[in-house]
Amino acid sequence: MDAGPKKLNKKVLVVDDEVPLLRAMVDKFTREGFTTLEAKDGAEGLKLALSERPDIILLDLVMPEMTGLDVLKNLRGTDEWGKRVPIIILTNLTGNDRLLHQISQNEATDYMVKSNWKMEDVIKKVKERVGIKD
């Protein structure tokens, strides 16, 4: 009898206003054994990040209420946890290499262009960033 996913004792926050994608990521990470948190806009995401202090954040850039870039700036400027927490930017922006380069200047920030990855790629990247060996 399968006992379900092994608990990884890692918390991931997914912040994305595309609800179908948000649901798919939350479901997949839950099945992989992560504790998952979700937010549908930047303001909610920032509030959850600061109160729950997840091990990693998946963050869309273009969202209502507060952009992902604003969330990133707020987190990086708050406290030591906010400066260090790994963040993976998930974006549809493909033509703005300069912006993406600026974002990734912080060693705790990666980015993935949504059209270029599969869910398994995101899971693998998250596991790498939080130190989980497969």
Image (cartoon, helix red, strand yellow):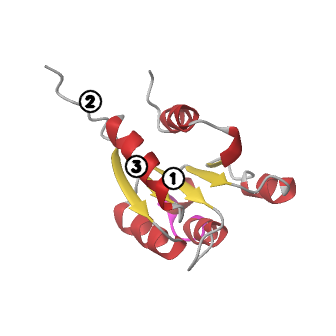
For mark 3, what is the residue?
26
Report the label total. Answer: 3
| Amino acid under disc 1 | Leu
**Contact (Cβ within 8 Å) of mark 1 with mark 2:** no
Q: Position of residue 48 (x, y in %)?
A: 40, 67
134 falls in the magenta region: no
Distance (Cα) linking label 3 and label 1: 9 Å
| Amino acid under disc 3 | Val
Of callouts 3 and 2, which one flags the residue occurring earlier in the amino acid sequence? 2
Q: Position of residue 46 (x, y in %)?
A: 48, 70
80 falls in the magenta region: yes
**Contact (Cβ within 8 Å) of mark 3 with mark 1:** no
| Mark 3 crowd level (few <14, some 14–19, many ≥20, 10 Å Cα) | many
Q: Quadrant of the C terminus?
A: top left
Residue 56, which numbered label?
Answer: none
Distance (Cα) linking label 3 and label 2: 16 Å
Q: Quadrant of residue 66?
A: bottom right
* Residue 77 is at least partly visible in this image: yes
* Residue 55 is at least partly visible in this image: no
**Span of residues in magenta:** 76-81
Q: Position of residue 96 (x, y in %)?
A: 84, 57
Please tell me whether mark 3 or mark 1 is closer to you in this view: 1
Q: Secondary structure at mark 1?
A: helix
Q: Nearer the viewer, residue 127 or 79?
A: 127
Residue 21, which numbered label?
Answer: 1
Residue 6, which numbered label?
Answer: 2
Outermost residue toward the front?
20
Distance (Cα) linking label 1 and label 2: 23 Å
Q: Nearer the viewer, residue 131 or 20?
A: 20
